[in-house]
Amino acid sequence: MEKILVLDFGGQYNQLIARRVRDQHVFAEILPYNRITPQEILAAGYAGIIFTGGPNSVYDEASPHYPKEVLSLGIPVLGICYGCQLIAYMDGGEIRSAGEISEYGKVEHTVVDRDDPLFKGVPERDICWMSHTDYVSELPPGYEAIGVTENCPCAAMCDRSRKIYGVQFHPEVTHTRFGAALLHNFLYDICGVSGDWTSGSFVENSVAYYRDKYKGKKVLLALSGGVDSSVAAVLMHRAIGDDLTCVFVDHGLLRKDEGDIVERTFKGRFGLNMIRVNAADRFLARLAGVTEPERKRKIIGEEFIRVFEDVARQIGKVNVLVQGTIYPDVIESGAGDAATIKSHHNVGGLPSVIDFDEIAEPLRNLFKDEVRRVGLELGIPYELVWRQPFPGPGLAIRVIGEITAEKLDLLRDADAIFREEIARAGLERDTNQYFAVLTDTRTVGVMGDARTYGYTVALRAVSTDDFMTADWTRLPYELLARASARITNEVKGVSRVVYDVTSKPPATVEWE
Ligand code: XMP
């Protein structure tokens, strides 16, 4: 497989660069600059290298540098922002601080050398996106400026003979209108790739690889019904068939009919060897009387492990445990200095309780959108591949206060109505996550001529890119009106419906 190295110098767009390269059907992997040497780059057979941006100035003592021989490996290089300045610095150019006239935002870019392969098909004048204080003020010997902006005499530069390129702007952000064309040119015309990274080739290679490696072994996977574990399960099943056992723990905190849908899909349709553990009673018993959210999460996490231990005992010795780890988890693991707002409980982390030899992570190189594409390639239904995120602790953190079977049923019905109405309005893709919450507030209502005293259901829908921040979705009033009327009429015990109009921050997506 052809691959591009994204050498990370601390830029905030490192993941975006890798994704844009992959959008062009070329595999890209991100490595911190201090984790790989030029010799290792050469040995790994990369078709090209992209230096990311970074927050530093090349003259800072602490700024990240890299051995100059990387520019003489015979592998094309593209430096972006700090990466461009670093190339110039390494080869003897000069960098200056632009001070007052630093460029930020959309800037007009002019191509100087329209014959350079980097600018093939790029308009002579177009908009690029800049974010820098320093700039290359004097080119290193052997380089020429091939693009300029008003304040940047070397907005793009190259040493064509060695295929070393640098751009001061950010081709990976969509505001740079010719960014995708430029990256395409770098990859196909300068690095000479053919573009072999497709979901079809990924499935084919993975199936061949895992069949060879694990056929005949005992392989176990915890299936949650979420996108990642579902795709990992179907992929692995295609490789090794019944040697894969999937364990699906139904903790009784799933949405309406969800457990049955998971079973129908994976056991029925895909023929997976699946053990469904109906453990609702165990979980409910442990959660009885518990109202504090973090305590709920902790109990559910622990109980999951207990249930798994029991299943593992029946299964006996396992050779391989499959996990649905995806690329952002791989890149971000270890970078955990952010404060814990909620201790997210996921069903993946179970190795300590199972006797196994090896972990397999078939999706560890994929971004989320790629996991979805692979899912579709494998024939997993669209609704499942585009399933909105659902928290590991399930409805336990959407029933505020004490959890009972009755309250869960009530919430499930209200939630199903809300989802149905969103689907009926065709708005499933216009909001990223939506659900009902059962508050522990009861209020007075009137029905017929009688007084009622029922629960308040809150509806929540959020729009977000990454779930780190989110805004509440402006759902149409008519939709809210229909959902409210149906919930109060059809769900006995609910007398009031409210819509949550709080963004994150200051609120979080979930109520607990
Ligand atoms: P918050 O509420 O933290 O939610 O703003 C952000 C995203 O994370 C999901 N979430 C969880 N997912 N275990 C999970 O697997 C959890 O304990 C958990 N808590 C929140 C939430 O649904 C949203 O998508």
Image (cartoon, helix red, strand yellow):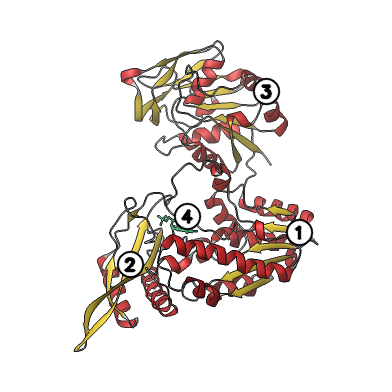
Up-down: is 106 above or below 234? above
Is 475 left, or right, of 90 in this rendering?
Answer: left
- Disc 3: which residue: 73
N-term mark: 2 or 1: 1
Of discs 3 and 1, which sits in the foreground?
1
Of discs 3 and 4, which sits in the foreground?
4
Give ligand 1's quarter of the image: bottom left
Q: Residue furthest bottom?
A: 449
Dot 4 amino acid type = Ser
Q: Residue furthest left?
A: 449
Residue situated in front as seen by the camera: 407 or 390: 407
Q: Marks 4 and 1, Cα distance to the nearest angstrom?
A: 30 Å
- Disc 1: which residue: 319
Up-down: is 113 above or below 322? above
- Disc 4: which residue: 343
Residue at x-position 71% and y-position 69%: 313
Q: Marks 2 and 4, Cα distance to the nearest angstrom?
A: 23 Å
N-term mark: 4 or 1: 1
Is 283 left, or right, of 417 in this rendering?
Answer: right
Q: Marks 3 and 4, Cα distance to the nearest angstrom?
A: 45 Å
Residue 337, given in percent of the width and then of the height, sits at 48, 41
Dot 2 amino acid type = Leu
Residue situated in front as seen by the camera: 260 or 135: 260
- Disc 2: which residue: 459
Q: Marks 2 and 1, Cα distance to the nearest angstrom?
A: 44 Å
- The quadrant of the rendering that contains the C terminus is bottom left
N-term mark: 3 or 1: 3
- Packing grade of label 2 (10 A; few <14, some 14-19, many >=20) is many
